[in-house]
Image (spheres, grey):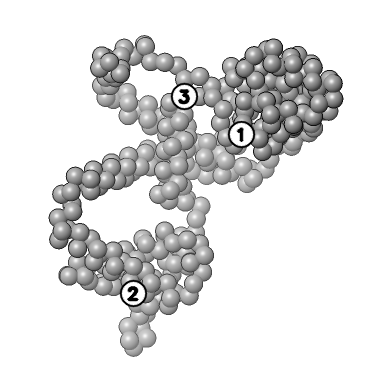
């Protein structure tokens, strides 16, 4: 659990969109150009005389009622195979993918024969899938050209290189609604009560309390809201806060277990993290670009138009690592 002070609709959209981009393979820039499965699709395409394997993506591998399945279709299917299946021999992978494609094509033909493409639920699902593909395609075209090795390196040089080693703290906490409750917990701790037991029993942060006795793990100062961080980083290991620490989430009683100084990571160690950060930033910019080019009218539960300046601010909320 992290108690972050940042939070916005656009940030959430960025996280969602980056997940979508990842799921469609948009972030596979560093992946090998040839995978075992891709090679597997070509090997069985040699002629009966042992000629060279077929490499033309338009080459036919099967037809179903005259509808074509090409080598390109099989290669595309191969990219979605689980890693463990990609380790199978090419002469096993290729016919398996062809059979799967034939089955799928046969089902599609049967579904169209039953006129399911005009079924309201099916039409809605197809429209949703098409809109999702359209969104991902547009976002990918906006974001991916900027996600270069040079951009990753520039971000590293600006945000990591030549920075001093950073301090981290390992702490746990008990979160309650009122100052009086927090003061009572401090009183119990002074009387010898176990911190983890009190956290499991009393903390409203159930995620950290029930399983870990309030343990938040290691975190940097910027990972938490200022009030929490300022208090935790001012404490010595083995101590707990003597007065309640107030944040927008309630009142915290904090116990610092350990602290350490972490050296600046090497670029290769944070390359994927930087890439994810850049995707989020670029997606946010793309969303702003899209919304700024359209007229948006919002309506409240009563059906009346909600003025733009009446949109509620999104308060900081806990977020998981």
For marks 1 and 3, give the one nearer the viewer.
1
Q: Is residue 63 above or below residue 142?
A: below
Crowd class of label 2 (few under 14; some 14 to 19; many from 20; radius 10 Å): some
Q: Earlier in the sequence, mark 1 or mark 2?
A: 2
The spot of residue 294 in percent (x, y) is: 27, 24
Q: Earlier in the sequence, mark 2 or mark 3?
A: 3
Nearer to the camera, 209 or 277: 209
The spot of residue 318 in percent (x, y) is: 56, 27
Q: Which label belongs to residue 8?
A: 3
Crowd class of label 1 (few under 14; some 14 to 19; many from 20; radius 10 Å): some
Q: Which label belongs to residue 125?
A: none
For marks 2 and 3, give the one nearer the viewer.
3
Crowd class of label 3 (few under 14; some 14 to 19; many from 20; radius 10 Å): few
Tell which residue pokes out farthest to the front in this image: 201
For marks 1 and 2, give the one nearer the viewer.
1
Check the picture and name the quadrant holding the C terminus: top right
| Image position of 163 (left or right of 87) | right
Find the distance from the CA under tag 2 to the CA under tag 3.
Answer: 51 Å
Tell which residue pokes out farthest to the bottom in this image: 49
Q: Which label belongs to residue 54?
A: 2
Find the distance from the CA under tag 1 to the CA under tag 2.
Answer: 55 Å
| Image position of 108 (left or right of 23) | left
Q: Which label belongs to residue 207?
A: 1
Q: Is residue 321 above or below residue 58?
A: above
The residue at the point 32 percent across, 23 percent down is 292
């Amino acid at each position: 659990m992290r108690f972050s002070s940042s939070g916005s609709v656009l940030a959430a959209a960025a996280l969602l969109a980056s997940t979508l981009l990842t799921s469609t393979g948009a972030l596979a820039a560093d992946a090998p150009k040839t995978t075992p499965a891709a090679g597997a699709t070509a090997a069985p395409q040699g002629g009966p005389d042992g000629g060279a394997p077929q490499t033309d993506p338009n080459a036919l591998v099967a037809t179903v009622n005259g509808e074509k399945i090409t080598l390109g279709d099989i290669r595309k299917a191969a990219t979605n195979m689980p890693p463990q299946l990609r380790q199978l021999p090419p002469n096993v992978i290729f016919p398996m993918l062809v059979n799967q494609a034939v089955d799928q094509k046969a089902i599609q033909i049967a579904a169209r024969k039953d006129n399911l493409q005009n079924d309201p639920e099916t039409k809605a699902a197809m429209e949703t899938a098409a809109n999702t593909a359209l969104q991902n395609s547009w976002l990918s075209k906006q974001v991916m050209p900027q996600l270069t090795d040079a951009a990753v390196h520039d971000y590293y040089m600006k945000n990591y290189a030549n920075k001093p080693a950073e301090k981290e703290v390992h702490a746990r906490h008990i979160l309650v609604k009122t100052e009086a409750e927090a003061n009572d917990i401090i009183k119990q701790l002074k009387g010898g009560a176990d911190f983890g037991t009190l956290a499991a029993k009393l903390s409203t942060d159930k995620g950290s309390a029930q399983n870990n006795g309030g343990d938040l793990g290691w975190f940097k100062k910027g990972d938490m809201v200022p009030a929490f961080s300022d208090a935790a980083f001012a404490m010595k290991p083995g101590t707990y806060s003597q007065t309640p620490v107030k944040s927008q989430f309630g009142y915290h009683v904090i116990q610092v277990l350990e602290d350490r100084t972490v050296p600046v990571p090497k670029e290769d160690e944070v390359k994927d993290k930087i890439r994810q950060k850049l995707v989020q930033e670029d997606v946010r910019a793309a969303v702003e670009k899209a919304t700024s080019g359209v007229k948006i009218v919002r309506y409240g539960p009563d059906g009346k138009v909600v003025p733009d300046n009446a949109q509620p601010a999104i308060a900081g909320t806990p977020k998981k690592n």
